[in-house]
Amino acid sequence: MTVAAESCSWSTRSLPKGSSNSPTASLGPCGSTKPSQTTRLPRNQLQAPQTLTFRVPSATRTLPAAAAAVLQNHPWGIQLPQTCGLPAPPPAFPLEYSIHTCSSRFLRELYLTFPHLRPASTSVGKPKSVNGTAADPHTGESNPVLVIPTFQPTCGSLVAVGADVEAEKDQKLINFMHWAYALRDRIRSMGDEYWADFTDPCSGYPVFSPRGPGYYSDVAGCQYLLRYQVLTTNCCNVLVHPHWGTEFYPATFFTTAPAKVVEAAIQHLAAGPCGRG
């Protein structure tokens, strides 16, 4: 299980009206989609979600000790080798992403996960932000924070149980970790002043940044940013993708790099549109 199916969420109380009205589209085999209808982009969304095939460069990637400990000890986490090295990703895999700016309300919630983003002049009791900006950890200057939710189609539902389902979730986690590592490296190579990080989908904690008192919920984040439907089943909130239903794996990336830098970095990693080599 991932944080996409959970018993609580950090920002449900802050969701805008109409945030859970996305319909569930018909599902094809292994998460295949039918063509989406053109709709108005939600507020703070810079582009509509698109699915690309990614070929992540082969590299030995080692998790930071704190993140590795969470993944190894978390009851829903993948069991990594003692070296904390990530298993190799597949040659190519599809991943859907979209790029969003932060509203001030969303950013206040994000400070609980990434406290170092809080501007130094901001009081702890009443965090302030201007147009979704936060302090860049490298420069100390205020920069817009971009949120990049990602989705990988799966052959099984997130709410299903079984060894094959858990194995697929583990593989999707490995895919995302490699993709996020490569994207972070690419963004940082395009400017030392850019901060970039991602959260572990199993725990909601940052992988590289200092951990705050709260975790990031992919469910609540996607419900707020994309207005996706959330179902409550067995005391858990389950995110519903408009094309893939519950047959997908979510994870989220964050950065202070400009949108054009982020898009260029993503396109650098992409092999082409989903289904093309």
Image (spheres, rainbow, N blue to C red):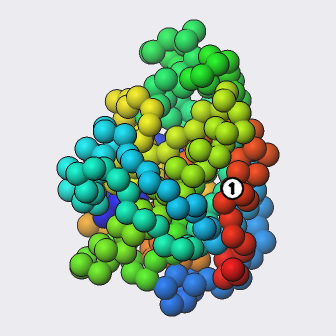
Q: Which of 143 and 131 is in front in this view?
A: 143
Q: Quadrant of the N terminus?
A: bottom left
Q: Residue 227, image x and y in percent?
A: 59, 58
Query: Which image quarter: residue 156?
Result: bottom left
Locate residue 114 relative to residue 138 in the image: left or right: left
Locate residue 187 relative to residue 176 in the image: left or right: right
Q: Residue 135, image x and y in percent?
A: 61, 22
The amino acid type found where label 1 is placed reads Ile
**Residue ID at (52%, 61%):** 58
Residue 66 visible here: yes
**Residue ID at (79%, 46%):** 260
Query: Which image quarter: residue 103?
Result: top right
**Residue ID at (39%, 69%):** 171
Residue 105 visible here: no
Above or below for 244 versus 78: below
Q: Residue 214, image x and y in percent?
A: 37, 35
Label 1: element kind: helix
Locate residue 149 relative to residue 60 in the image: left or right: right
Q: How many labels does the image show?
A: 1
| Farthest-out residue, top | 121
Q: Residue 154, image x and y in percent?
A: 46, 77
Identify the residue under disc 1: 266
Q: Nearer the viewer, residue 62 or 160?
A: 62
Q: Quadrant of the C terminus?
A: bottom right
| Farthest-out residue, bottom | 29
**Residue ID at (30%, 46%):** 68
Q: Nearer the viewer, residue 143 or 45?
A: 143
| Other residues around mark 1 within 10 Å, as few (<14) / some (14–19) / many (≥20) | many
